Amino acid sequence: MTLQLPKKVEIIEVGPRDGLQNEKAFIPTEAKKQFITQLRGSGIKELELTSFVSPKWVPQMQDAAEIVSACLDENTRNIVLTPNAKGVERVYMTDCKAVAVFVGVSNTFNKKNINKMTDESMDELAPIIKELKASGYFVRACISTAFYCPYEGKMEEEATIRLCRQFVDLGVDELSVADTIGMAAPHEAFSLFSKLKHAFPHLLLTAHFHDTRNMALTNIFAALQAGVTRFDTSAGGLGGCPFAPGAAGNAATEDVVFMLERMGIETGIDLTKLVQAIDVIRPHLSRPIETAYYRLSQTEKV
Ligand code: HMG
Ligand code: MG
């Protein structure tokens, strides 16, 4: 028997957005710009630049417009997150052509995160997504609490698949399905992603694992077995949603790339340059970078 592994995997770097949004002290805009430039230099081709959200709710993202105007690059898919019409209006004022909307399967989480019930968010987003698609935008739908909610506990697979189907019917290009609090175990990752692959075989399907309980890498391996070839990761393992208590950072780009390349799976990312990108943002963070690859890169040849 042989492992079924893809030849190539696409990494969507979410560090500048998910990675930084939970940092309390404001990180200078110039440092964020340099981080983005260096991430691209390491070979990242798809990137969440920032989010157009309320600066009162997420003060770290208050410089989003400046980041977008400075950091668009035609060789990268530059994605901006937004949950509502106001955010999309802000997108229309830029040259950004890729938008990520986000909704939780869990009503309680969605209310805490976006101040709306899930259905209310969908009612607001439906015409917006149709308009974005008609205007030629790339639309990514981020599905939060796809496995577990910090308030409601386990989410039924059927509820997650139903929400994904609503987005697919609206014409989105990509689903990014998230284990927001890092609670999913590999058998659950395999099960949900197998069903999503089966239900939406022609859609870009991306897995987004937070690493709260050190299961992100194993979940990525499980998702690979389910046929997923796209992963959201964050350089330095930064991240977490301010409205998901206890959620740790995302799967670390460097550890994911190291694992994939060790298995002979191409990512197009240069780890030495990725470490240099992390070094740009590290002095501005509230916590040390403790990912395995980064730590080893400081002491020995990895
Ligand atoms: P609200 O208070 O209900 O909104 O918040 P509102 O419509 O009443 O507006 C309140 C104020 O915010 C107004 O300004 C609006 O103009 C402004 P004021 O009149 O008070 O000066 N406003 C905005 N400003 C800028 N950009 C906007 C925007 N919208 C309204 N887009 C709202 C509702 C959605 C705005 C708020 O709840 C919010 O900003 N939430 C964002 C939360 C967030 O960013 N969470 C993290 C990202 S999601 C995530 O991390 C999960 C993910 O990684 C996947 C996973 O891991 O699960 C994607
Ligand atoms: Mg996240």
Image (cartoon, rainbow, N blue to C red):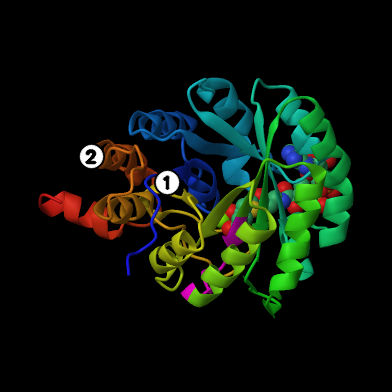
> Horizontal and vertical percent for residue 86?
80, 37
Q: Quadrant of ligand 2?
A: bottom right
Label 1 SS:
loop
Q: Nearer the viewer, residue 26 or 244?
A: 244
Region of the chain picked out in magenta, as a range: 177-186
Residue at 27 percent of width and 36 percent of height: 273
83 or 196: nearer the eye?
A: 196
Q: Depth check: 158 or 27 in front?
A: 158
- Is residue 149 toward the left or the right of residue 3 in the image? right
Which residue shows up at 39% across the image and 71% down it? 214
Q: In this rendering, would 219 be left or right of 289?
A: right
**Residue at (64% x, 46% y) in the render:** 202
Tell me where residue 135 appears, x and y as whole percent.
78, 24
Secondary element at tag 2 = helix
Side of 168 where 220 appears, left or right:
left
Residue 7 against residue 227 in the figure, above or below: above
Residue 174: quadrant of the picture: top right
| Residue carrying label 1 | 9
Residue 263 showing in the rendered view: yes
Kindly report the secondary structure that dominates the magenta region of the rendered protein: loop
Q: Which mark is residue 272?
A: 2
Q: Count the marks: how many?
A: 2
Q: Position of residue 94 (x, y in %)?
A: 68, 22
The question of residue 153 being in magenta is answered with: no
- Going by the numbered disc 2, the residue's amino acid type is Thr
Q: Is residue 161 left or right of residue 289?
A: right
Residue 257 position within the rendered picture, expressed as x and y whole percent measured from the top left:
33, 49
Distance of label 1 from label 2 (alpha carbons): 19 Å
